[in-house]
Amino acid sequence: MERINDTLKRLAGNENFQKRFQQMRNGILNDPEIKAFLTENEEELGPEVIEKNLSKLYEYSNQSKECNKCDSLEGCINIMKGYHPQLVVSRGSLEVHYDKCPRKIMDDEKRKNEKLIQSLYVPKDILKASFDDMDTDKERTDAIGKALGFVLRYSENQTTKGLYLYGQFGVGKSYLLGAIANELAQKNIRSMIVYVPELFRELKSSIGDSTLNEKLEAIKKEPILMLDDIGAETMSSWVRDEILGPILQYRMLDNLPTLFTSNMDFDGLEHHLTYSQRGEEEKLKARRIMERIKYLAEPVYVNGRNRRN
């Protein structure tokens, strides 16, 4: 087998190889970015240093910078996906350093924000909701304004009253919760969105594996809790008095912001809470729950067309 040094010597004497090498060298040194860099650092980088580091200049010139050669982060052409090269002079020599590209920075920020939004049984489109993509028709102007107002008012050091978003099916109540959560995440504020009927089902099943108290404590103490579609659950005395009541009581005493969506207004929800699935009528207990909800959240009517049709 031919040794590498012998191979290089043989190639160096090959006329075609020399011609191709010279063309490649000229292409590298005539690259506008490289020319500008070498001119800026000409005092430190003499001809010998440049010749010695042609491979590094080649590495730099053939990659995408500022995502200019890539259609997406997944389609990144660089050696390190999501990182673009920077030429650096270090102790009289050339080095290629890699920094996060703009798309990688945006993707990392998005993933960080997603981690700040915890969710249980909430559709993915709700978790991607944004005020920027929201239809601002006249019927929903007030509700959107109140939702944005909550984000602007919220502070960990002061009491911020939540929102009780109610209206017909498909008008965008849950989408508003998702938009609020994403806006808060951009301010590094954690929140949790929970689909109420599934939450209650899970908590009921947790009695068997002894995890009920642990899960209940975690939900009670969330910095910002969003209860989606309250009133859609099958009501029982246990759910109302042992689950919903303690959650709301804890959050009321600790002034923890709580937001709700529902197809029912306050009167409708109180009626729903009054009657259990067994037909029991308990007006006083339902009224206690409603007093906590009214303390925690301002009612906001969400109007408009059904966007699910």
Image (cartoon, grey):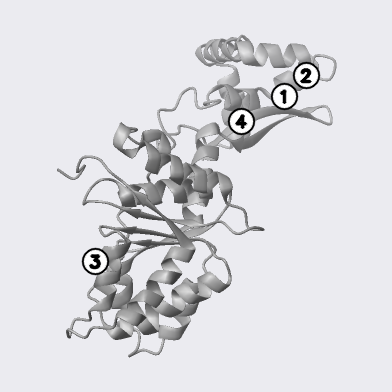
Tell me the element at label 4: strand
Write down the residue under mark 1.
Answer: 52
Q: Are marks 1 and 2 in contact (CB under 8 Å)?
A: yes
Tell me the element at label 1: helix
Q: Residue at x 32, y 50 (%)?
A: 173
1 vs 3, front mark: 3
Q: Residue at x 52, y 70 (%)?
A: 252
Write down the residue under mark 4.
Answer: 85
- Between the C-alphas of marks 1 and 3, the distance is 72 Å
Lower position in the chain sequence, tag 1 or tag 3: 1
Amino acid carrying label 3: it is Ala
- Image quadrant in which the C terminus is located: top left
- Between the C-alphas of marks 4 and 1, the distance is 19 Å
- From the top left corner, tell me how far across and down residue 269 is, in percent: 29, 66
Tell me the element at label 2: helix
Amino acid carrying label 1: it is Lys
Q: Would you call the spot at circle 4 few (<14 residues within 10 Å), some (14-19), or many (20 or more)?
A: many
